């Protein structure tokens, strides 16, 4: 296969690659933070937080990410004065932060459902044993439940990161040209279809690296 | 005009689109692609029908060729590839005529165009030099001559490229970007309507060889006799005043078609 | 509300036709997606090393490549390929892959990769005895697969396939980027005409949520039906 197309555009492709990583890295971190209150809400005994969390999860899991991104980016543009009043317009003004926010909100819904599933799957005895040992609720969660739940949720979480990498390609619709966006621009200039095959290979490499990392994580940190 | 019927037609074509349409119709049909998000040249209405100045021009050309136009609206970026691989017989979407495009397809000039910037009302639109926009952000539609022009000359600005003009307008009125570059007529339409409170067209215009020499109808390379037939139809429309009459329905100013 | 209605200024009919196209793209992707997925699952269980590697390669590749990339590549690539083939054969043709077909085909390739995992799990869930019983009845390979194994595998695979169907429904929104007139694109067109960004995109999200909720309900019923024989009535 002809490599000149890739070599000529190496700089652009690298910039796209960096943007993909930045989008995914930051979104995954923010998603992890949002997940915590969401899981607590899903498992809450009180009606209001449970209803809120369930609605949240239903909304973000039930509709396409691309629609959510448009809603957040172009929708927020209509409420500029309100958002300025709240002092958060700088965040919505920027396509990158807007995309990160959309991805984080979306990913948190999936991750929360995943973590809740993992906690629910733990036998009731784990809680009872911890209580019998005199551990408080926070300590039980931190020392007993979470390590086990994380181990269960880890493969699913790996999949979630992979989905984020793939999903990041839609940001071209809001002017952010990450890896696939750059590839599309190259195609529209050269009409050379082989650039898509190169892009596919790059994505396969990235995803394989993520999968290996997660397998390593599963085996080394949670070996007991 | 009953929108319901158009909807039924749309439904039927959608359902049939998977089968290869092979039946030769009695009348000659010309498949034409256009943008659809480019007011007032092409817009899709709520009945799924494409309308606008480009469509009226195309229909007039089809009438002269004894053919019926079959319109499809799609993303601007994919229009030239679609002509190349035969998806459409031609594309009428106000494409600027550039040497780069002429390498890939044939182009028939149908009107002169000029490029300007859209800027917020209170700002100075008399200086469109890269220096005046250093550190600011400027938007344009992807795969247009404006996008290439900005990329080549405005390295000191943050550049934003949108799938269609519409998104660029949205970001300008929301204050996310400081200017939008585009064809003067389409920018004019927007500041007459939606954008009249926020923005204006720059007093200065941009003339640069890379912006291209007028707007052209796109046909596949060496597609004869279509190429000369369309050329003849366009020439006729200019000589008998038909083009000016169509143009006047949309714009108060006239435009020429220099050879 | 007038905006979403079916009156003269409303986009109701437009949205409805978009929903039909969305469902069309998703439903058209199913047969090939399911069949190819099953073939890949069988390939991964095959005794042939080559077949195993190819199947695993396919499944992991299409799970790694963004759906949008597959859609772009099929949409632009297939037309180029057909043109090339036809010009080799000296046939003049203007036939190109329609957007709906390209979108469905691309999504079915992705669906196949994910569904192969589900089929694999389902096939593994069927007891060895079933294969042996079919064999002892003298059923040839294909017949035992079709009459004994698949009906049982389908029941086991159904919940997983149901999840994939819901993912597929949402992924169809991506075909709007190749200008297929699906629900998402109709919303984009309405936005372009009316500039009601927030309301219309919120409506788009809710539209898809309704689709996924209806699907979930339907799948639950289907699940109950297929496992009816497992429920003991007192």
Image (spheres, coloured by chain):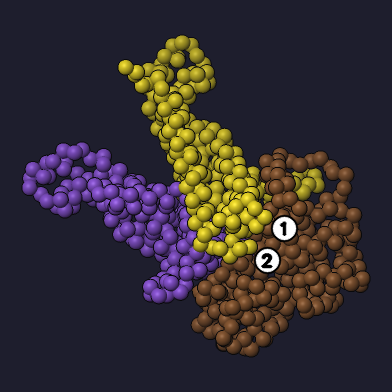
Q: From the image, state the color of chain A.
A: purple
**Image coordinates for residue B259, horizontal then vertical, percent:** 85, 76
Circle 2: element type: strand
- Measured as percent of width and height from the top left, residue C161 is found at 46, 36
CA distance for labels 2 and 1: 11 Å
Q: Residues within 10 Å of mark 2 (few under 14, many from 20)?
A: many
Q: Is there one chain holding both mark 2 and mark 1?
A: yes
Indicate the colour of chain C.
Answer: yellow
Name the residue: 69% across, 83% down. B205
Chain letter for the brown part: B
Report the residue at 64% width, 44% height from top: C101
Label located before the other in sequence (2 or 1): 2
Q: Chain of mark 2?
A: B
**Residue C227 visible from this viewpoint:** yes
Q: Which residue is painted at 29% across and 52% down in the image?
A: A49
Q: Which of the 4 image quarters holds residue C118?
A: top left
Q: How many marks?
A: 2
Tell which of A204 and B54 is nearer to you.
B54
The disc placed on residue B38 is 2
Residue A203 appears anywhere in the view: no
Which corner quadrant of the image does residue B141 belong to?
Answer: bottom right
The residue tagged 1 is: B50
Q: Is residue C161 left or right of residue B66?
A: left
Is A91 placed above or below A210 here? below
Please say if B233 is above or below C94: below
């Amino acid at each position: 296969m002809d490599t000149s197309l890739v070599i000529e555009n190496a700089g652009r492709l690298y910039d796209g690659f960096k943007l993909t990583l930045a989008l995914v890295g930051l979104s995954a971190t923010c998603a992890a933070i949002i997940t915590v209150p969401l899981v607590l809400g899903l498992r809450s005994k009180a009606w209001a937080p449970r209803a809120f969390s369930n609605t949240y999860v239903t909304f973000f899991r039930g509709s396409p990410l691309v629609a959510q991104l448009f809603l957040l980016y172009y929708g927020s543009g209509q409420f500029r004065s309100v958002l300025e009043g709240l002092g958060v317009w700088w965040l919505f003004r920027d396509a990158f932060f807007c995309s990160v926010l959309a991805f984080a909100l979306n990913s948190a819904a999936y991750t929360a459902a995943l973590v809740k599933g993992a906690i629910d799957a733990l036998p009731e005895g784990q809680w009872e044993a911890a209580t019998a040992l005199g551990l408080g609720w926070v300590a039980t969660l931190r020392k007993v439940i979470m390590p086990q739940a994380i181990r269960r949720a880890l493969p699913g979480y790996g999949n979630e990161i992979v989905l984020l990498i793939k999903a990041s390609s839609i940001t071209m619709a809001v002017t952010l040209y990450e890896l696939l966006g750059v590839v599309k621009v190259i195609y529209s200039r050269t009409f050379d279809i082989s650039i898509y095959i190169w892009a596919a290979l790059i994505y396969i490499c990235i995803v394989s690296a993520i999968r290996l990392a997660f397998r390593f994580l599963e085996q080394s940190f949670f070996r007991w | 005009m009953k929108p319901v019927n158009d909807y039924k037609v749309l439904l039927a074509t959608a359902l049939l689109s998977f089968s290869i349409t092979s039946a030769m119709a009695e009348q000659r049909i010309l498949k034409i692609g256009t943008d659809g998000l480019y007011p007032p040249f092409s817009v899709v209405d709520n009945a799924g029908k494409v309308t606008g100045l480009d469509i009226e021009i195309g229909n007039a050309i089809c009438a002269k060729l004894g053919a019926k136009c079959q319109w499809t609206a799609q993303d601007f970026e994919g229009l030239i590839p679609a002509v190349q691989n035969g998806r459409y017989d031609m594309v009428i979407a106000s494409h600027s005529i550039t040497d780069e495009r002429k390498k890939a397809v044939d182009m028939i000039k149908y009107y002169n165009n000029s490029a300007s910037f859209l800027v917020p009302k209170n700002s100075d639109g008399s200086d469109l030099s890269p220096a005046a926009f250093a550190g600011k952000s400027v938007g344009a539609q992807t795969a247009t001559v404006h996008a290439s022009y900005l990329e080549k000359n405005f390295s000191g600005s943050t550049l934003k490229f949108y799938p269609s003009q519409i998104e660029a307008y949205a970001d300008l009125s929301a204050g996310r970007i400081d200017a939008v570059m585009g064809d003067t007529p389409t920018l004019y339409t927007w500041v007459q309507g939606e954008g009249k409170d926020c923005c204006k067209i720059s007093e200065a215009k941009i003339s640069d060889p890379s912006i291209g020499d007028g707007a052209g109808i796109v046909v596949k390379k060496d597609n004869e006799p279509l190429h000369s037939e369309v050329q003849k139809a366009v020439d006729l429309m200019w000589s008998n005043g038909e083009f000016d009459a169509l143009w006047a329905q949309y714009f108060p100013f006239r435009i020429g078609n220099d050879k | 509300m007038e905006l979403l209605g079916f009156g003269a200024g409303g986009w109701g009919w437009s949205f409805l036709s978009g929903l039909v196209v969305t469902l069309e793209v998703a439903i058209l992707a199913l047969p090939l997606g399911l069949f190819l997925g099953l073939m890949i699952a069988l390939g991964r269980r095959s005794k042939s090393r080559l077949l195993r590697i190819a199947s695993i390669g396919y499944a992991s590749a299409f799970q790694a490549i963004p759906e949008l990339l597959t859609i772009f590549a099929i949409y632009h690539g297939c037309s180029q390929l057909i043109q090339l083939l036809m010009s080799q054969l000296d046939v003049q043709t203007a036939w190109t892959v329609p957007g709906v077909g390209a979108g469905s085909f691309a999504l079915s390739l992705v669906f196949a990769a994910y569904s192969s995992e589900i089929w694999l799990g389902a096939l593994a869930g069927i007891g060895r005895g079933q294969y042996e019983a079919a064999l002892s009845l003298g059923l040839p390979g294909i017949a035992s697969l079709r009459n004994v194994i698949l009906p049982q595998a389908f029941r086991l695979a159904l919940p997983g396939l149901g999840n994939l169907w819901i993912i597929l429904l949402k992924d169809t929104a991506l075909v709007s980027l190749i200008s297929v007139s699906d629900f998402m694109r109709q919303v984009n067109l309405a936005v372009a005409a009316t500039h009601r960004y927030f309301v219309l995109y919120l409506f788009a999200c809710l539209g898809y949520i309704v689709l996924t909720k209806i699907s979930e309900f339907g799948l639950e019923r289907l699940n109950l039906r297929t496992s009816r024989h497992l429920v003991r009535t007192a």
